[in-house]
Amino acid sequence: MANPSLSEYLAQSQRGLYQSVFGPEYLQKQTYFTVDTASGVFNTTYGRKVWQALNNQTRFFNAIPRVVWGNTAGWRVRTDRGSNRSRPVTETGALPTVDVSNIETISSLPRIVSTTFGASVKSVFTAQLEGGVGDVLALENENAQLDHIKEMNEELLAGSAYIASGGSATTVTLPASIAKHFKVGDKIAQYDADAAGHKRQTGSTVSGVSGTTVTVEAGAGSDDFANGDIAYIFSRAGLTSIDDVVSVDGSTVGGVTTRSRAYDLTIGSRTAGQWNAAASASYNSGTGRALSLNLLDTAIQKIRENGGEPKLILLGHDQYFNLERLLNSNQRYLGQEEYQVGVGSERTFPGTRTGLVLATYQGIPIIPDADVAKSVASDDTVLGSNVYVLDTDYLEIAVAQPTQYVENRDYFAANALVVRGLLYTMAEMRCNNIFVQSKIADLNA
């Protein structure tokens, strides 16, 4: 059965209308639509329509199958066949030595993503008068739904490790386009370039992200973040990203080794070529390079060698056009039949069977997403977006609780005449076979 559309996925948002899921911190630092401040709900306007000036596309979220969570908090993985228990036996020879498979365990628990909004009682009334924006609660509810799914898409595509340009014991300085990949509640570890060693091995919790600055828990004096250090994910507060999954201990950022984790795997165990590492993670020591068909073919080959079959090529719009230019030189004009390929509830861009406009490569659908993580050079310059080749048979968004909408009008609890709304989803992205996913990084834009 096809994945539900975005509208169908959010159709259950009226559940729990009068539940109270607001924690004590929800009463702190609230921002509401009001009339007496410059919030814009009641002022001189040229109509009520509020146009979106934001990219609300969620292509990767739409392309990954969504399933019911099920009765599990993880799974086990068979990682070897046992030693010498299968071999030829001569007519009177001894039987093979008895051995057993090696079984590893994976921890996977649901994560909660939430989106809030609020408006004063006065603004709710006046916003519907002439010159207002109309039903401000309905307006923000609609916008919050878009923002909620967009947040999940961004979390699914967040990068795992980046090189810092500076910082302190409690801050990490990163390009603004990179800092957003770290979320409040994430735990990050550190590679100290000067000491050539890994620090913060139990993870430092992120408490804030603003512009180019990520605020973290204080570490020892020797743990100050400095230019050239690496900040990498120890654990996620939100959804596990595809970059967390498609990683190995040998993964490098700007030529420096990282140890990003997924599903509570032990730091230091994700060696290249092992069961809990990607089929292929291609880097270039922090030096930008052009995307090539050889790189893409190698990623596909490694997946097939590991027993998988690529179902999706995920990339940014920059690499989409780079790949288009690569294939144009080999184009044969045998016809101009236009077609599209469906991936989950998403569709590829229209293509022709001559490859003039891409839809597939070697029969594998290509989906560009503006939120795909980018690499950084050794001097922390932002490079082009990564390319992921994925076997989506082993990827799923497991939903423990579908998106819920809660509206609260308890003025005494808020100690203000305000109406508050909350959307929340309890889910997690699960990969049941890391060994058949691959990544190409350190690419030019």
Image: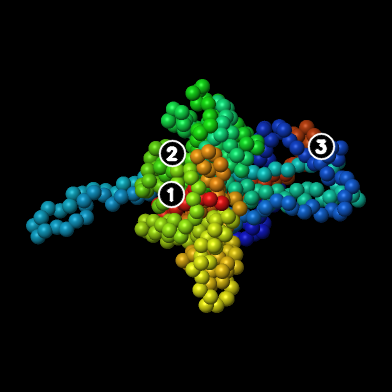
Q: How far apart are the alpha carbons under marks 3 and 1?
A: 54 Å
Residue 361 makes an appearance in the image: yes
Residue pointed to by mark 1: 281
In front: 345, or 424? 345
Mark 2: amino acid: Thr
* Pair 2/3: label in front: 2
In front: 437, or 408? 437
- Residue at coordinates 86% horizontally, 54% vertically from top-left? 47
Earlier sequence position, callout 2 versus callout 3: 2
Q: Is residue 402 left or right of residue 201?
A: right
Residue pointed to by mark 2: 257
Mark 1: amino acid: Ala
Please tell me whether mark 2 sits on a helix, a strand or a loop: strand
Q: Which mark is residue 417?
A: 3
Q: Position of residue 245 (x, y in %)?
A: 47, 47
Earlier sequence position, callout 3 versus callout 1: 1
* Pair 3/1: label in front: 1
Quick one: which residue is furthest to the bottom in this view? 335
- Residue at coordinates 59% horizontally, 33% vertically from top-left? 173
Mark 3: amino acid: Leu
The quadrant in which residue 316 appears is bottom right
